[in-house]
Image (cartoon, rainbow, N blue to C red):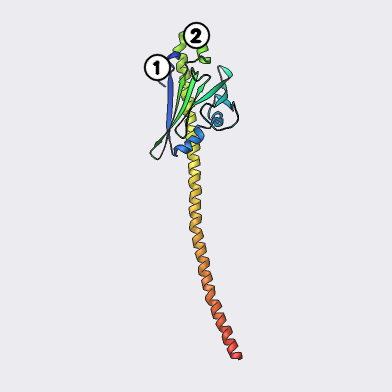
Amino acid sequence: MEWTGARYADAPTVQVDAWIDGPPEAVWRFASDVALMPQLSGELQEIRWCDEGATPALGRAFIGRNRHRARGEWETTSYIVECEEPRVFAWAVTDPANPTAVWRFTLTPEEGGTRLTQWAQMGPGPSGISQVIERMPDKEQKIVHVRLREFEDAMTATVGAIKDRVETDHVEADGVEANRVEADGIEPDGVEASRVEADGIEPDRVQTDGVQTDHVQEAG
């Protein structure tokens, strides 16, 4: 990403997007799956809900365990702040009123598919990054830039992984449908062939009945 000179208090943002060959409902399945997130991220290691259930809903909270080569491991609690199926899914980290970060997926129908956009905001609430900045205030802009670039790289990988999963499912579904169509085409032919064969047998039976009739008449 390009250098912006942003500071942490500016709550800088970054976003990535991709067109996906699938309807918003299919994309939503993956974009809103909190439990799937660790499989799509190199930094996020584990997710667990703070209450019972696995369905995303406005106000629900989950804990994320993260790992970074420079910072080690830490946990944060996130709160779902937007959940409009199949359009928008977003969560704020630590405190919705003063978040350390906000993450959002937006799904927009486009050209028979879906434009998936992931957007992230850094800060402005206190976080591990703000603590690093406090120790090296003269490097604040560089620290922010490097972290935003990490966000962008991770988001690009996440959106790409969702795209792959949706389109793989789409292809597999098309294959199943093609098999059904093929099967439907075979079945009528088979039924028709059986009917023709049955019709062919029936005259033989009639002819046989005729022979039997002649035989009876001759015997009489």
Q: CA distance from mark 2 to mark 1?
A: 19 Å
User: Crowdedness of circle 1 by 10 Å Cα count: few (<14), some, many (20+)?
Assistant: few
Image quadrant where one finds the C terminus: bottom right
User: Crowdedness of circle 2 by 10 Å Cα count: few (<14), some, many (20+)?
Assistant: few
Q: Amino acid at mark 1?
A: Thr
Q: Quadrant of residue 207?
A: bottom right
Asked if residue 6 lies left or right of residue 70, the reply is: left
Relative image position of residue 74 (x, y in whole percent): 58, 19
As drawn, the residue found furthest toward the left would be 111
Task: Determine the residue positioned at 52% across, 24% down.
Answer: 79
Residue 4: mark in rendering: 1
Residue marked by disc 2: 136
Residue 140: mark in rendering: none
Q: Secondary structure at mark 1?
A: loop
Relative image position of residue 86 (x, y in whole percent): 46, 35
As drawn, the residue found furthest toward the front would be 59
Task: Determine the residue positioned at 48% across, 50% down.
Answer: 178
Relative image position of residue 75 (x, y in whole percent): 58, 20
Q: Secondary structure at mark 2?
A: loop
From the viewer's side, name the closer residue of 52 and 156.
52
Callouts 2 and 1 close, C-beta under 8 Å = no
